Amino acid sequence: MLLNRFLIIFFIFGTGFYSSAQNYIDYLNAANEAEHEFVEGNLDSAKKIFAALEKKYNKLKGKDYFYTGLIYYFQLDTVSGKEYLIKSAETRLLLTNDLSKFRSKFPELNISESTIQHIKLIEKRKIPAKEYEISDSIKAFIRLDQEDRTVPGNFDEKKDFLVQKRLLNFLQRYGMPDPYIQGEEIYTIILHVSDTMLYRLYTSYLYKELVNGNVSPMYYCALVDRTMYRNNKQTKYLSYYPSKEIPNLSKDEILENRKKIGLSPYYQGTCVFPRIRTK
């Protein structure tokens, strides 16, 4: 079983996928099963699921290329392992730091330093100019959102509304920024949405991007659950405050809700987080 060593690696996979008219929730659910098989050490089973997904969708998400590459390395097929790690890098998944952690925790992985350097060059080349161009705008939104929050509980609802509305317009025009390049701070703005109209617009936008494979399900359900929790309403996914949320739903109902949006039925976020605990 890889679980004990695997869980100590801080390893968050987010978006960096590709838009399409195809609904990727089925993809995400299958990938969640493969991830679970991988963590449990059932490498052949995980590889089989990933291979089926690659055949059906003609490509994989960056994290799933990464998992597949690691499987090949664990099975001593370094040629195929390198091929899939390179495919992962080609999707703009910045993985060299995570590779270093894996090499430290799993000495049996024979990933050469030349392969690491090759991947670093690919990552640098694949970051599109647009991500640099929008960086200043993203930082400006974050700065505006945070400047009134230096004192706990101190915030301006009208200003929050304007910042959140402008950000939504920006996202609808330019798309969701790559979290591996811009970071995930933008989601702190989204999670503070409290206006009812904006909440509906954001959840609609995030769900559409989720279906197209451009947003992690975790971001969508965190906004939903956080809003429900804050308003003392029934949460749906047990995703934001798992230690505080008291859902009236059964475990099967929670897991069914999570599967409807492609969220893992095994882990709170990704496999580095605790397993789902429900009453």
Image (cartoon, rainbow, N blue to C red):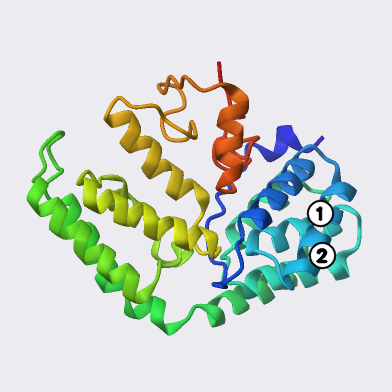
239 with respect to 39 (left or right): left
Left or right placement of residue 65 versus residue 261 in this view: right
Kindly check if marks 2 and 1 are in contact, taking CB atoms under 8 A apart as contact: no
- Which of these two is toward me, 58 or 90? 58
Q: Residue at x 78, y 38 (%)?
A: 2
Q: Nearer the viewer, residue 243 or 278?
A: 278
The kind of secondary structure element at disc 1 is helix
Q: Residue at x 60, y 62 (%)?
A: 23
Q: Which residue is mark 2?
A: 81
Q: Which mark is residue 49?
A: 1
Q: CA distance from mark 2 to mark 1?
A: 16 Å
Binning the other alpha carbons within 10 Å of mark 2 as few (below 14), some (14 to 19) or many (20 upward) gives many
Q: Quadrant of the C terminus?
A: top right
Q: Residue at x 37, y 78 (%)?
A: 132
Q: Name the spot of residue 254 as percent of width and height, x first.
A: 56, 30
- Marked residue nearer the N-terminal end (2 or 1): 1
Q: Position of residue 276 (x, y in %)?
A: 59, 28
The answer to whether residue 13 is left or right of residue 244 is right
Residue type at mark 2 is Gly
| 54 sits to left or right of 99 | right
Frontmost of labels 2 and 1 is: 1
- Give, as a three-letter code, the residue at label 1: Ile
- Few, some or many residues within 10 Å of mark 1 (<14, 14–19, 20+): some
Q: Nearer the viewer, residue 257 or 108?
A: 257
> Image height check: is 118 above or below 259?
below
In the current view of this chain or complex, which residue is farthest to the top? 279
Can you see residue 263?
no
Q: Is residue 241 visible to us here?
A: yes
- Residue 228 % position (x, y): 34, 33
Q: Which mark, residue 156?
A: none
